[in-house]
Amino acid sequence: MARLIQWYPSVKLWDWKSGEELRTIRGHGGAVHDVAFSPDDGTRLATASHDLTIKIWDLTDNPEARILSGHAGPVNGLAFHPGGRILASAGQDRTIKLWDVATGRVRSTLAGGHDGAVLCLAFSPGGETLASADKKGVVRLWDTSTGRMSQKLDDDHGGAVSGVAFRPDGEHLATAGKDGGVRIWELKTLRKIRTDTGHLRLVCSLAYSPDGKYLASGGEDQTVIVRDATGGLVISASEGHTCWVHGVAYSPDGHYLSTATGIGPEDPAKARLISGGGDGRLKLWDATTGLVLRTIYGHGADVWAVAFSPDGSRLASASIDRTVKLWDAASGDEVLTLTGHTGGVLGVAFSPDGNLLASAAMDGTVRLWDATPWPPSSPERGNDPGAAR
C-alpha cells in the first residue's frame, strides 16, 4: 500500500560492509513512495515520488536519471514487466501508465478503470496481464499488449485492496482487502473460486510460494496464515506476534517466507516460516504445525519489511529503529547492522544479482548498499570495509 511520507528526495550509494557513503544522487522534489529494481540485470532502479514523476537511475556509472512525467498526481507504486522492458506505475490520479524503459516514453495510459487512487500493481508471470487495485476496493485486469481493460473484478473488500498476487502458473489471482478476506479468482473464467477467511482485520499483504502450492498472508490481527493454495485449507495459523504483521514474501528458492515471512522445502515436515512485525522480533516457524522454533531478537522497534537475497542465503530486515539488519538465513544469526538512516526504515530490496541492497526510510532517502556476498572463507565477514564501486 502507498505510504505518503514526506521524505527528503535523494538516493545514496553505500558500502554496506563499512557503512561508508559512496555516492549521493539527488533528483526528486518530493516524497519517494516506492522503489523497484529492473528484473533483467538489476542495473536500473526506478523510484516513484510525490512530485508526480518517476525516475529511472542507471546504477553503473551515470548519475543522471531518466525522468518519466505524465501523472497528474503523486505516484504510489511501481512494477516492472517480467521482461524488464516495461514499467507500470500506479497513480493517485486514478490512472496506470505503461512506460518504455529504454526510451522513457508512455506506451499507453490505462484510464477510466478506477474511481479511486490506484494503490498496487502486479504483472502476471508471462507479463500478458496487469492487475491493479484501488482505494475503493476495485480490482482491474488489463491486456498489456493493447492497453485495454479486459475485466473488472467487483467484490466488496470493505475498502482498500492492499495486495494482489498471481499464482506462478498464471491461472489464479489472489486479492487481499480491508475486511480480512482473501479472494481467489480463476483467470480463465474470471470466476471467484472462494473467499478465504481467518484474519480479523486488514490483510496487509499476501504471496504465493514459488511452486504455487501455498498462499501466505499477514494481517493487522497479528497473525500469519499459510494455506493450501488449491483448496484453501489452513496449514498454519501463527499468532506469535504482539502487533500487526506488515508483509509477506517468499524467497526465490521457496525455502523461507518473510513478512519480515516463507514456506520451506518441498517436504512439509521441513517447512519453515520467518515472520516479523510490530513487536520488533523475527520468528522462525514450523509452517506445518505453526509452532515457534526460534525467536530472533535484534531490532528495537517495529520490523516493517524483510527481503531475501536471490540465493536465499541472506535476509535483510528494515525497522522503525532506523537500522537495516543482515541475517544468516540458515542459522538466524545476526551478521551485520547497517546504520546511517536518521528515520525509520520502511522498505528493503535486493537487486536480481544480489549485489545491491536498497533501503527506503522516513528520513527521505533511498540508500543503495554494496551487498556483494562475503567469501565463504572470510574470517571477518561484516568487518571487512570492502571496496567502493
Image (spheres, rainbow, N blue to C red):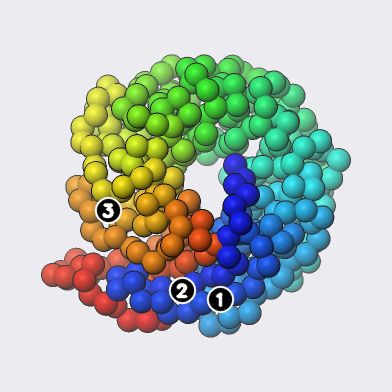
Residue type, mark 2 in image: Leu
Q: Which residue appears at 60% of the width and 42% of the height?
A: 1
- Is residue 100 rendered to the left or right of residue 257? right
Q: Position of residue 232 (x, y in %)?
A: 48, 19
Gap in Å between the C-alphas at discs 3 and 2?
Answer: 21 Å
Q: Position of residue 243 (x, y in %)?
A: 40, 31
As helix, strand or loop, the secondary structure at mark 1 comes to: strand
- Asked if the residues shown at circle 3 and circle 2 are in contact, with their CB atoms under 8 angstroms apart, the answer is no
Viewer-side residue, 271 vs 25 = 25
- Asked if the residues shown at circle 1 and circle 2 are in contact, with their CB atoms under 8 angstroms apart, the answer is yes
Instruction: Please tell me which of labels 1 and 2 falls first in the chain.
Output: 2
How many circles with numbers are drawn on the protein? 3
Quarter where residue 265 is shown:
top left
Query: Mark 3 Cα within 10 Å, few/some/many (few <14, many 20+)?
Result: some
Mark identifier at residue 13: 2
- Asked if the residues shown at circle 3 and circle 1 are in contact, with their CB atoms under 8 angstroms apart, the answer is no
In the image, farthest residue toward the right? 112
As helix, strand or loop, the secondary structure at mark 3 comes to: strand
Quarter where residue 350 is shown:
bottom left
Can you see residue 252?
A: no
Q: Which residue appears at 39% of the width and 38% of the height?
A: 277
Q: Position of residue 256 (x, y in %)?
A: 34, 41
Residue type, mark 3 in image: Trp
Viewer-side residue, 341 vs 193 = 341
Residue type, mark 1 in image: Ile
- Is residue 385 rendered to the left or right of residue 348? left
Gap in Å between the C-alphas at discs 1 and 2?
Answer: 8 Å
Residue wearing tag 3:
327
Q: Position of residue 87 (x, y in %)?
A: 67, 58
Mark identifier at residue 25: 1
Query: Mark 1 Cα within 10 Å, few/some/many (few <14, many 20+)?
Result: some
